Amino acid sequence: MENKNILIKEVNKLLIKQFGIPKRNSKLPDSVDMLIATILSQNTNDNNSYKAFKKLKEKYPTWEEAAKAKRTSIESVIKVAGLGKQKSAAIKGFLTEITEKKNKISLSYLKNMNESDAINELTNYNGVGVKTASCVLLFAMDRNICPVDTHVHRTVNRIGIVNAKTPDKTFLLLNKNFPPKIAHSFHTNLIRLGREICKPKNPSCGICPLNKLCKYGEKDLQIKRMHKRNDFMLLDHVQSKYSNN
Ligand code: SF4
């Protein structure tokens, strides 16, 4: 087995010891819901993007209704999530394009595709990037894929699991033969590590459970207070009454 995978498994174990196994809903959310929630989550916190997602579902109970709405109407509904113009254009663009291509708004046709074909298919839609596509695969289709957001990119590079300048490059290196069955806990706990301990500036290495194995060259080993617990994950809450399922 590659060193990278040995390190991923060890990091996963230590993070579970620190934070526990992240909770997951037993029922998977709808893939289109997940895609739109991920678009809304870009460059904002999970609380605001969750509010925007709820407002959007309340205003347009079906995606067919949202597809017929004006982009500017969608923009005003989702403004709490920020970047309203860009996000409404991506949402409207995706809904229009999938309706034209498939004659219905459903991603169920991805079910029989392998991971890389499904990522390629999703990223062919305007406004859908690798992070959004990989979140759909992990959170809505239960595939063993680790999406790379800003926290995952920063932490896996500091730890020394990969060495890459951009999140998309990190995604490719990290997911090459990713160890089975642990993508959800690894991804979710790394985000929590990034929010609470391995912050962009002044990481709290002195209280970090990964301190011994992490290869970061600029560790700050002062013993600091733990940051406030921050484990609300939007993409694990795209479910139940806000889902079309
Ligand atoms: S030891 Fe420091 S740099 Fe390494 S993962 Fe922990 S907080 Fe981040």
Image (cartoon, rainbow, N blue to C red):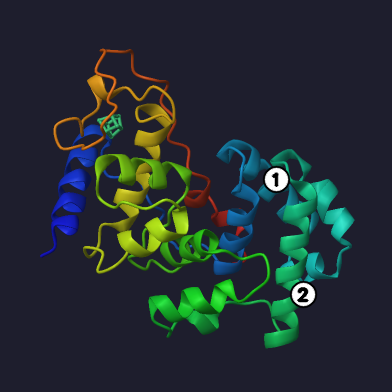
Q: What residue type is labelled 2?
A: Thr
Distance from label 1 to label 2 (Cα)? 20 Å
Nearer to us in this view, 29 or 134: 134
- Binning the other alpha carbons within 10 Å of mark 1 as few (below 14), some (14 to 19) or many (20 upward) gives many
Helix or strand or loop: what does disc 2 sit on?
A: helix
Q: Mark 2 points at which residue?
A: 96
Residue named by callout 1: 52
Question: Which quadrant does the C terminus fall into?
Answer: bottom right
Q: Which residue is drawn at 88% across and 54% down?
A: 73
Q: Where is residue 50 in the image (x, y as percent from the top left)?
A: 62, 44
Q: Residue at x 43, y 32 (%)?
A: 195
Q: Using the image, determine if residue 125 lies above or below residue 186.
A: below
Q: Is residue 49 left or right of residue 21?
A: right
Answer yes or no: is residue 150 visible. yes
Figure label count: 2
Q: Is residue 48 left or right of residue 151?
A: right
Q: Where is residue 206 in the image (x, y as percent from the top left)?
A: 23, 19
Q: Which residue is drawn at 46% across and 59% down?
A: 168
